[in-house]
Image (cartoon, rainbow, N blue to C red):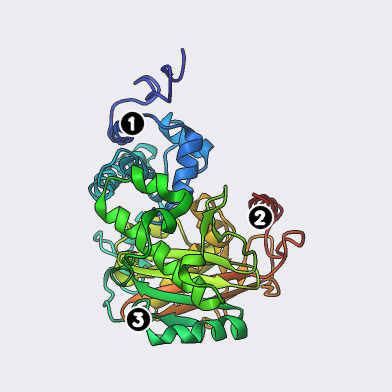
Amino acid sequence: MSQQRRGTRGIDIPTEDVLPPGAARELLLALHVLYIDADRPGVRDIETGMKEDDELPGTMNRQAVSDVLAGRVFPRLMQTKALAMFLAKSAGGDPEPVREWVERLWKEAYEERRRAVGQQTAADQDAQEGGDGAPEPGSLLHALHHLEDELFPHEIESDIALMVTGPTDDRWGALAGILQDAGSALVVGRLTHWQPSPAESVVSLLGPELGRYEKTKDPAERRRLLSTRALIRHSVAAATDLKPHQVVLRTSPGGRLYVRGMDTIDIGLTLDGDLAVVGLTRVGLIGVGIATAQSVAARPPAELLDVLAPHEVDFLRSIAREERMSRLMNLWVLKDAYTKCIGQGRQLHYTAFGFTTDQPATPAFLSPEISSPHDDDWSFATYSTGRGHRIGAAVYTQLPDAPPSLLDRGLRAKLRNFLTD
């Protein structure tokens, strides 16, 4: 019997003999409702669109999209939310209620699967160590569920970060010097300060992204797109001898932003609500990530343990309870920044690599193939805004024909392909 029905276009939900009624099928039905509402976009279009959307919690390649919609694999939570939010946006809807809806369905499906196999995940085992269903005091989950928002020991000061309040901020004058001296810089700003000026038309500001803007029906989404591009233009202009209107932004086939006619500066972008961070580097490639204690602690345990390498879990369990959230946030944003830097996003499993934990001010990359850290090609840093946000930056300083010594062979190939897009 055929495992999947295909219509004239797109992917149909599998039959009940393949995926029986239950929570997992309800989750897949919800994804297909969104998929149909978005007019069944092709998997290639979904892959490209997810890479281009900086506000999604993850990305997926076309094979992963196909596997999930066909019911061949059970998706990770971040994949589920990212795919659902992208499809909702494509249909002109509000992604936030959709994110909450599919997250609830995913948790129900996850519990169904866990019960079906009769085994507990590592997260479940942790949660039940106390004997009465509560996390054991001193365990990782207990720390994550009982943390104060203001708990930020081990703050790491950064001399490359510049916080600005708008186009007329006096601090812009320091950016060129930071970039020249340090090679990289971070510009932190709130999107409410970055509404386009009358001189900045939507067409000139967005260029090839105008089509994305016109397809977006949500006014808030439109404002975010315009504000981030205005912030990037002013950041590049302040770092160079250009005027903001002379900075023409483009997007590579891999979804990476760059300035037309300028190959000396690489750009990274990350968002959390109203806060945006632009990363600039003149020495290679840059990726940036951002998180808050609330956003990290609110993740379900299964998702938290889905981002940590085994040695990182062991480390968090070994340190004092009051230090755990700060160190977890550092690991979280560093992984986000690293995967963005190499153009993979959440396509690369966070558990497949990690960072050293003995020196929080100078983290180094580790992978299963590396017995000791090696920092010649990469530099990493974390930075706190002092208001609850943790920012991570990853800078890769080698050229395309000299792949990173820290990457395994598969990742090296992916990076070379990305750089030649």
Farthest top residue in view? 1
Q: Amino acid at mark 3?
A: Glu
Alpha carbons under labels 2 and 1: distance apart: 34 Å
Mark 3 neighbour density, 10 Å: few (under 14) some (14–19) many (20 or more): some
**Image point (36%, 65%), residue name:** 199
Mark 2 or mark 1: name the one nearer the start of the chain.
Answer: 1
Closer to the N terminus: mark 1 or mark 3? 1
Q: Label 2: few (<14), some or many (≥20) within 10 Å? A: some
- Nearer-N-terminus badge (2/3): 3
Examine the rendering and report whether any part of residue 142 can be seen.
no
Which residue is situated farthest in the right direction here?
Answer: 401
Label 1 amino acid?
A: His
Residue extending furthest toward the front: 199
User: Residue 146's x, y, as percent?
Assistant: 26, 72
The numbered disc on residue 419 is: 2
Q: Is residue 283 visible?
A: yes
Relative to 9, is 269 above or below? below
- Check disc 1 and report the residue beneath it: 32
Q: Position of residue 361 (x, y in %)?
A: 53, 83
Name the front one of labels 1 and 3: 1
Q: Quadrant of residue 292?
A: bottom left
Q: Secondary structure at mark 1?
A: helix
Residue identified by numbered label 3: 322
Of marks 2 and 3, the one in the foreground: 2
